[in-house]
Image (cartoon, grey):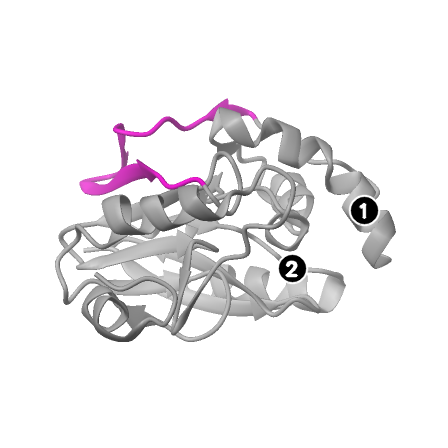
Amino acid sequence: MLQVASFTFNPFQENSYVLFNEQKDCWIIDPGMYGADEERVLFTFIEQHGLQPKQILNTHAHIDHVLGIDALKSKYNIPFGMHTLEQPVLANVRGSATMFGFHLPVLPVADFFISEQEKINLGEDELEIRLAPGHSPGSIVFYNAEGGWVIGGDVLFNGSVGRSDLPGGNHETLMKSIKEQLYTLPDDTIVYSGHGPETSIGKEKASNPFVRG
């Protein structure tokens, strides 16, 4: 069964995740490390647990979720994947870096694309891919039925929802995505979000002030 380790990085307090199995293979989801100190935190975890990084997978491509991609690719020579609809968002990252004062010497480039309805495997463990646009055009979520959790990026938060006022965002689309792609999961499904603490599908359906189930 996949284990989930979470880390909070960069000034946006973005949540990055390492998923790993009993064979010590791992995926890195939304690496947001900024600077050598934060990179060292993630690298140390990987090394201390004897993990073998296989791929970088992103829920979406806003700057706070991609800051650590180049460092991971340089150290481990692993590919980076996202949904093809995120290409315009990724292309705009350099402008975002300038706006927020981030040093971004290398603009990440996707090595492969992930499509909705497919399932990807790390050994015997499986992630279901669901397209959930609204925060960004190609936002995807990673659902692990066996573990009872979903990594949702910036779609749904504990008591809140993602912004829809950024380029490529749309409020009605975001609400539809939450209802159709997240609220259709079992109520006890843990939601690991891109910011803030974890929550559950049942809790958000019952009490989220922006979208009830």
Mark identifier at residue 33: 2
Dot 2: element = loop
Q: Which residues are magenta?
A: 111-133
Q: Quadrant of residue 160?
A: bottom left
Instruction: Name the residue located 48 percent from the left edge and 73 percent from the top edge.
Output: 196
For label 2, the crowd category at 10 Å Cα-Cα, with few meaning under 14, some 14 to 19 and many 20 or more, is many
Query: Residue 132: x percent and y percent?
Result: 38, 41
CA gap between label 1 and label 2 equals 12 Å
Q: Amino acid at mark 1?
A: Leu
Which quarter of the rendered picture does the N terminus lie within?
bottom left
Q: Which mark is residue 104?
A: 1
Q: Position of residue 203 (x, y in %)?
A: 23, 73
Q: Is residue 92 left or right of residue 55?
A: right
Q: Label 2 is placed on what type of residue?
A: Met
Q: Earlier in the sequence, mark 1 or mark 2?
A: 2
Asked whether the viewer can see residue 109, the reply is no
Q: Residue at x 43, y 57 (%)?
A: 18
Towards the viewer: 118 or 183: 183
Q: Nearer the viewer, residue 207 or 52?
A: 207
